[in-house]
């Protein structure tokens, strides 16, 4: 009888612990999904600033951002125009990686204003808009 009681108590405690871990894991994932994010078009990652700056020179839109460990070269950011920018950069024969980056709600609102301009502009004007976006906002990204 004591052996059975110990097994039942152990099983119950194990169940409570596992349920608690599962709950907190789900809660953290749900909170992470609600954070605002942007799509960043990255063309390079370097440990050395000089190498990143040299590589950036290959791109008229290149911007180097240091994340504490690496120097990343970005050529565009957007919230709603991932396909539009992909088409633009594909037409330039750029090799890039699209990275989701967390941001603040304020920055997301500002980028959405630029996104609206991107949708309504010609390809030539899109380059100018992107350059302005990168210069104005990319210092704020969290990798």
Image (cartoon, grey):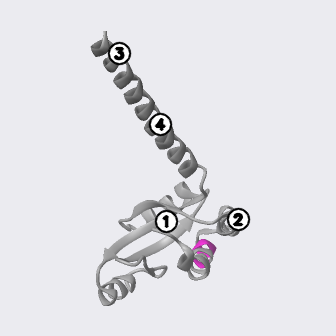
Residue 112 rendering spot, x and y as whole percentages? 68, 63
Contact, mark 2 vs mark 1 (Cβ under 8 Å): no
Magenta highlight on residue 40:
no
Q: Main secondary structure of the magenta part?
A: helix
- Residues at marks 3 and 4, CA–CA distance in whole angstroms: 23 Å
Q: Secondary structure at mark 3?
A: helix
Residue at the image position 55 percent from the left and 44 percent from the top: 30
Name the side, left or right, on which 27 lies relative to 51.
right
Residue at the front extreme, as displayed:
2
Residue for badge 2: 109
Pick whichever of labels 4 and 1 is earlier in the sequence.
4
Q: CA distance from mark 4 to mark 2?
A: 36 Å
Which range is magenta? 124-128
Q: Which residue is mark 1?
A: 40
According to the picture, the residue beneath numbered tag 3 turns out to be: 5
Residue 97, quarter of the rendered image: bottom left
Say which residue label 4 marks: 20
């Amino acid at each position: 009888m004591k052996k059975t009681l110990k097994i039942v108590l152990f099983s119950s405690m194990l169940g409570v612990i596992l349920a608690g871990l599962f709950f907190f894991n789900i809660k953290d994932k749900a909170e992470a999904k609600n954070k605002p994010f942007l799509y960043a078009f990255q063309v390079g990652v370097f440990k050395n600033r000089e190498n990143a700056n040299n590589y950036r020179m290959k791109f008229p839109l290149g911007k180097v951002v240091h994340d504490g460990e690496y120097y990343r070269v970005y050529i565009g950011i957007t919230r709603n125009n991932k396909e539009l920018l992909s088409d633009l950069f594909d037409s330039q024969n750029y090799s890039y990686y699209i990275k989701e980056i967390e941001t603040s709600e304020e920055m997301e609102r500002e980028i959405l204003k630029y996104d609206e301009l991107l949708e309504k502009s010609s390809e030539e004007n899109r380059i100018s808009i992107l350059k302005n976006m990168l210069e104005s906002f990319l210092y704020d990204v969290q990798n």
